[in-house]
Image (cartoon, rainbow, N blue to C red):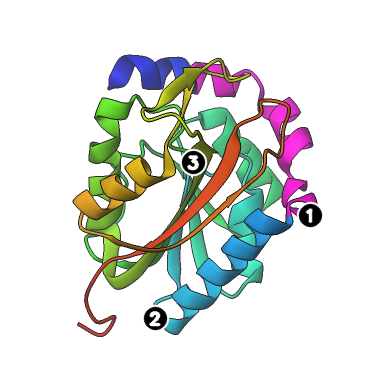
């Protein structure tokens, strides 16, 4: 898992300021993604455990949005450059460099995990390990919102992302991986492309079974 992650880290370190300038306010023009993020925050608040991890937080714009939606978020990113930018842009929030399959978070401690297009660079065979880590840190009843590029093809499709190689996923296949990790996928939103790549955009909400008070 290390080689492709190192390549991804170096690639994102090299585009920090450009990436931040392009995406820091992007959800203002993306109503579907914004709606799913708002629903996710409301459901996490309902668990009475507002601690949330924004994994693959990039420049920290969504971490800040989670705070504005009433959560207690921390941002984690593989790229030291992204973490540095996030700390400067949002000094009141917590950001830390970390790998998604090895988060510095206690077991069963979070009410929510956000993965906003942060799993797209992971080769399909390695994705179950990342999902297992999200399950480890979620408290019973906790929520995961994962967003990704979707395809109507029967298998994941590799493509040349502008920063690092990436994959689009059949939505049912991705939902099956969530179920296989022990989560209950209960809501999805799939909509037309928001970019010139032409891929569908997908957002899946899943819950870890169990009572939040357990």
Q: Dots 3 and 2: beta carbons under 8 Å?
A: no
Q: Residue at x 65, y 38 (%)?
A: 85
Q: Where in the figure is residue 206, as x and y percent of width and height?
A: 37, 62
Q: Which residue is mark 2?
A: 47
Give the label, 3 or 1, closer to the camera.
Answer: 1
Q: Is residue 31 visible?
A: yes
Q: Residue at x 31, y 28 (%)?
A: 124
Q: Which residues are magenta?
A: 9-30
Count of number-bearing discs: 3
The part of the image, by quadrant, that contains residue 39 is bottom right
Q: Residues within 10 Å of mark 3 (few under 14, many from 20)?
A: many
SS category of the residue bearing label 3: loop
Position of 115 with respect to 124 (left or right) is: right
Q: Is 121 or 85 nearer to us in this picture? A: 121
Q: Residue at x 47, y 76 (%)?
A: 43
In this rendering, is residue 75 above or below 196?
A: below
On residue 56, the disc is 3
Which callout, 3 or 1, points at the residue further toward the start of the chain?
Answer: 1
Name the main secondary structure of what is drawn in magenta: helix
Q: Is 24 or 35 nearer to us in this picture? A: 35
Q: Where in the figure is residue 103, as x and y percent of width and height?
A: 32, 46
Position of 27 with respect to 191 (left or right) is: right
Q: Where in the figure is residue 47, as x and y percent of width and height?
A: 39, 81
Magenta-span inclusion, residue 13: yes
On residue 28, the disc is 1
Q: Residues within 10 Å of mark 2 (few under 14, many from 20)?
A: some
SS category of the residue bearing label 2: loop
Q: State the CA–CA distance, disc 3 to disc 2.
A: 23 Å
On residue 11, the disc is none
Magenta-span inclusion, residue 1: no
Q: State the CA–CA distance, disc 2 to disc 1.
A: 27 Å
Q: Where in the figure is residue 70, as x and y percent of width and height?
A: 59, 75
């Amino acid at each position: 898992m290390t080689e492709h992650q190192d390549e991804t880290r170096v690639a994102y370190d090299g585009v920090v300021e450009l990436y931040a300038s392009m995406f820091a306010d992007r959800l203002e023009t993306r109503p579907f993604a914004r709606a799913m993020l708002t629903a996710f925050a409301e459901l996490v608040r309902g668990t009475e455990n507002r601690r949330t991890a924004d994994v693959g937080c990039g420049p920290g714009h969504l971490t800040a949005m989670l705070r504005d939606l009433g959560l207690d978020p921390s941002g984690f990113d593989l790229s030291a450059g992204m973490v540095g930018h996030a700390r400067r842009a949002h000094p009141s929030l917590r950001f830390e460099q970390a790998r998604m399959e090895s988060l510095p978070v206690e077991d069963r401690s979070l009410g929510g995990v956000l993965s906003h297009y942060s799993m797209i660079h992971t080769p399909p065979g390695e994705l179950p390990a990342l999902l297992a880590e999200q399950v480890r840190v979620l408290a019973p009843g906790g929520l995961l919102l994962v967003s990704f590029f979707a395809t109507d093809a029967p298998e994941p499709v590799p493509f040349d992302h502008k920063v690092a190689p990436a994959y689009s996923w059949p939505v049912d296949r991705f939902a099956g991986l969530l179920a296989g990790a022990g989560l209950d996928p209960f809501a999805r939103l799939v909509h037309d492309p928001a970019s010139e790549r032409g891929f569908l955009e997908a957002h899946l909400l899943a819950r870890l079974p169990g009572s939040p008070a357990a």
